[in-house]
Amino acid sequence: MADEPQKLTKATYDRLHEELADLTTRGRIDIANAIEAARALGDLKENGDYHAAKDTQGKMEARVRQLQQLLKDAIIVESEVPSDGTITEGVIVAIRYHGDDEDDVTEYFYGSIEERIGDLQVLSPTSPMGLAVAGKTKGTDVTYTAPGGELAIHIVDVRA
C-alpha cells in the first residue's frame, strides 16, 4: 500500500477524509476520557477497563496512520467505463465462473478495498483475479491462479 498511490473515487476520498477528521478530533477526545475514567477506578495492573481503552486507542491510532498514508498520495479516479470498455479502477465488473449456470453472475466493484458501493464486494486490482481482469473487456475469458488452484472466468459485463 505504501509503495503505490491508491486510486479512489471522489466519494470515497471524501468519506475517508471525514473519517480521519473524526478520529483525530472526537475520537481522540472520547478515548482520552475513557482512559481517564478507567484510571479513576484504581489499580491499573488488573483494570480491564483501562486495558480495553488503551487497546482501543492503539487500534484507532493505527487507523489514523493508515488513513493519513492512504490519503497523502491518493489519486482520484472517475467511476466511468472507458470508451473502449476496459476494466479500470472505479467500475463494476460482472463475472461468471466457467461451469456455472448462465444466470449465476457475481458483481464486484473493481478498485481500492476502502471503496464501498452498496453491498458489492471489492475486487482489488492487486489480487490474483484483479490482476487477471485488468484492462480486459466484456465478453473476455480469463484464467488466473488463485490460492486454491487455477480458475477460469468469463467477464459478463463492465459498467460504471
Image (tube, rainbow, N blue to C red):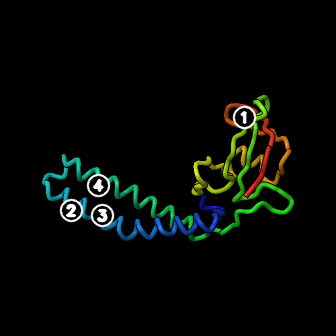
- Residue at the extreme front: 103
- The residue under label 1 is which amino acid type? Asp
Residue 33: image quadrant is bottom left
- The residue under label 2 is which amino acid type? Glu
Do residues under tags 2 and 1 come within 8 Å of each other at their CB atoms? no
Disc marking residue 104: 1
Q: Earlier in the sequence, mark 1 or mark 4?
A: 4
Q: How many marks?
A: 4
Instruction: Report x, y in % for residue 110.
Output: 69, 53
Mark 4: give few (<14), some (14-19) or many (20+) Cα within 10 Å: many
Residue designated by label 3: 30
Please state which of the two labelled residues, at mark 3 or mark 2, is closer to the viewer. 3
Instruction: Report x, y in % for residue 81.
Output: 78, 60
Mark 2: give few (<14), some (14-19) or many (20+) Cα within 10 Å: few
Q: Earlier in the sequence, mark 4 or mark 3?
A: 3
Q: Earlier in the sequence, mark 1 or mark 3?
A: 3
